[in-house]
Amino acid sequence: MVADFDPFASPDAALRRRVHQRLTALAEASEGRTGEALAELARPDATWRVAHPIPACASTAEALARAFAPLKKACPDLERRDVIFVGGSYQNRRYLAAVGHYCGTMRGDWLGLPASNRPVYLRYGEVYEIDAEGAVLQANLLWDVLDLMRQLGLWPIAQPLGSPEMWPAPLTADGVRFETSDAARSVESIAQTLAMHRTLAEFDDRSKLNRENLIAMPQKEHWHPRMMWYGPAGIGTTRGLDGFVDGHQLPFRIAFHRPQGTLAEVQAEKARHGAGHYIRIGDGPFSVTGGWPSVYAVHAGGGFCGLPPSGKPVFMRVMDFYLHHEGLIRENWVPLDMLDLMMQMGFDALGRVREVLRR
């Protein structure tokens, strides 16, 4: 078993379908009915954590005013397209988690970004804590605003090392899961993810950080030879372990100096700074982890997104969705609040674009 994960307490099929239908209805509601659709989805006192620059919302009414009403006004024909929709129970809390894209014609300005009058895709990773009736208690919404800026031709930073394309659905075409999965398979998936995480946590960045050592270290025991790693805008997609190391892992570790030591020591130091996971679930061949924040590090090295080192401590809001296939981790989707991270690094990407547009 995996600590705090209960494979037998996963939301059942009826609950999953109910929440999924309400999420779809929220996306597709007319501008005038968005509030009603949101009220059907969540409790009035639900808390909403949303990617930068949308502030945290202490109620569903605030989430309407700050997040959903402005998005709906900008994209009146909005719709929701999930490619992953999974569930599980962690620390006696029920969760549903999704990866996908909001699609709509951007007919109005949003977050200071100008209307394009063309179809746009707003990539998301979302985790919802729900009650026994399916009402949302807490929402964690990582919307990839930086990728929307790319689509609008308003790119504010260096080009990513990975491919900056739309994230695909899982290879196995079974990412939207309404029926509950086999408990043993679910445990196996999250256990494999956490075993891989251990190898990453215990790798010695201080004396061993180079390309060859990252490729050779024990993480290779968990990744499929044809692994795909789907990073957020600013990082991009990589393929294979060597592509992952070259396109993300090595530059990331050079830039961000993280706690060192055994897994227990690393977790304790992260927790001391308020970082860690609020979700760890398996759902058949899928697993999900995430934290708000889940990563604590010091931005002590250069190169990440073309930015110089700031020397500042940073905290990263991250989700990881994994597909386990042929006994290994085949695909990894990684929503990350890049605009919030860059703000901590001393660079306001959205502000830069707004200033360019103003001039």
Image (cartoon, rainbow, N blue to C red):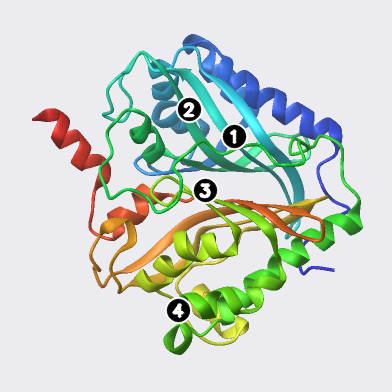
Distance (Cα) linking label 1 and label 3? 10 Å
Against 259, residue 286 (above or below) is above
- Quadrant of the image for the N terminus? bottom right
Give the secondary structure at mark 3.
Answer: loop
Mark 2 touches mark 1? (CB < 8 Å): no
Q: Which residue is mark 3?
A: 335
- Whichever of callouts 1 and 3 sits on the residue coming sooner in the sequence is 1
* Residue at 90% in and 54% down: 183
- Whichever of callouts 3 and 2 sits on the residue coming sooner in the sequence is 2
Q: Which residue is mark 1?
A: 100
- Whichever of callouts 4 and 3 sits on the residue coming sooner in the sequence is 4
The disc at residue 210 is: 4
Badge nearest the viewer, 2 or 4: 4
* Residue at 41% in and 63% down: 315
Give the secondary structure at mark 2.
Answer: strand
Distance (Cα) linking label 4 and label 3? 25 Å
Residue 4 in sight in this render: no
Q: What is the x, y in percent for residue 278?
A: 61, 59
